[in-house]
Amino acid sequence: MAKKRTKVGFVGLGVMGTPMAECLLRAGYPLSVWNRTAEKMEPLAAAGAKKAVSPEAVAKGADFVVVMVSDDAALDSVLFSEEGLSRGMKRSSVLVNCSTTSPTMSWRAATALRSLKVHYLEAPVMGSAAAAQEARLQMLVGGHRDDFAKAKPILEAFGKEIHYVGDVGKGATMKIACCLMVAAMVQAFGECFVLARKAGIPFETMMEVLHAGPLDSPLYRAAEQAIVNAGGRPTFLLKHMQKDLNLATDLARQLDVPLPLASQLRQMLTTAKNLGKGNEDYTAMLDVMAAWSGVALRG
Ligand code: NAP
């Protein structure tokens, strides 16, 4: 289908959704957008998108609707509330859920949409808002292969690393497993940091060692930036990472898999959230480690 004739809708213009919607505009798709907090639609409207009054209005006439909201409850609301997407999506259109949500939510959404002859694909993403701006997100796709083939040109607007993981639920599951690794790596960074700092090793020396050897990782570079640029705009909210660890421990329970590390990480993130850090960057986990260890995170 030619891009100019492929109508795309986008719901959820947060930290990730805004640059992803911009990618679709840059790729030449006619775009209609909706966000719960209406002001967040303004930059997209200024760039050429059409503002819609509801998710239902976004869905009207769209061939594809991409959703990038925070969690299961948000997805449920934008899909199935009174003016939800399910009220407006046309037959044979495809709903592409890029949010990090549970496989259970995916199965429920896919089943409900199938009864309306609407196709469901999950494509949660790996990568930051900066990666979204530069169209280099990695996508982990779950759904029917035919729906994937149909939606691939849309996904290519967000990045080139697109992995078909399996049927509905598998993409969500792979993403949750990856989130677990991200949280574990940040926690490991924090423990390395407090040990080195309390022993009097300068931060710059610690980072020099991490960057130069087998431990080098973009994640540790991001953690370094978060420490150096304290007070900057959060890139990934701590409350979302706590949600991801909740998803991991729920899934572990369903599959009867022991995940001792995930339980500890969940407790760490719940502590940080209850200390008022839910709307800070996820690297605020490090503040908790520093406070427990009696060292300053910065300076
Ligand atoms: P965010 O900035 O907090 O944006 C969340 C979006 O969801 C906002 O548009 C928000 O609307 C909307 N929303 C929340 N509850 C809603 C509800 N009940 N009804 C309608 N809309 C609702 O989060 P984000 O960082 O963009 O993350 C979005 C998703 O991507 C999450 O699942 C996250 O885990 C995942 N993710 C994030 C990153 C990252 O680096 N940030 C990376 C990979 C994956 P309002 O504007 O009205 O609040």
Image (cartoon, grey):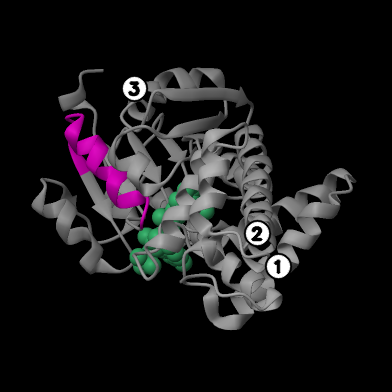
Crowd tier of the residue under label 3, counting other residues whose Cα lies within 10 Å: few below 14, some 14–19, many 20 or above:
few
The kind of secondary structure element at disc 3 is: helix
Distance (Cα) linking label 2 and label 1? 20 Å
Residue corresponding to mark 1? 268
The answer to whether residue 29 is magenta is: yes
The residue under the point 64% across, 78% down is 291
The kind of secondary structure element at disc 1 is: helix
Q: Nearer the viewer, residue 216 or 274?
A: 216
Q: Which residues are magenta?
A: 15-31
Kindly identify the amino acid type of the residue bearing the numbered disc 3: Pro
Is the Cβ of the residue at disc 1 closer than 8 Å to that at disc 3? Answer: no
The residue under the point 47% across, 32% down is 138
Residue 99 visible? The answer is no
* Image side of residue 214 versus residue 56, left or right: right
Kindly identify the amino acid type of the residue bearing the numbered disc 2: Ala
Residue corresponding to mark 2? 196
Residue corresponding to mark 3? 153
Q: Nearer the viewer, residue 37 or 174?
A: 174
Q: Nearer the viewer, mark 2 or mark 1?
A: 2
The kind of secondary structure element at disc 2 is: helix
- In the rendered image, which quarter is residue 48 located in? top left
The answer to whether residue 86 is magenta is: no
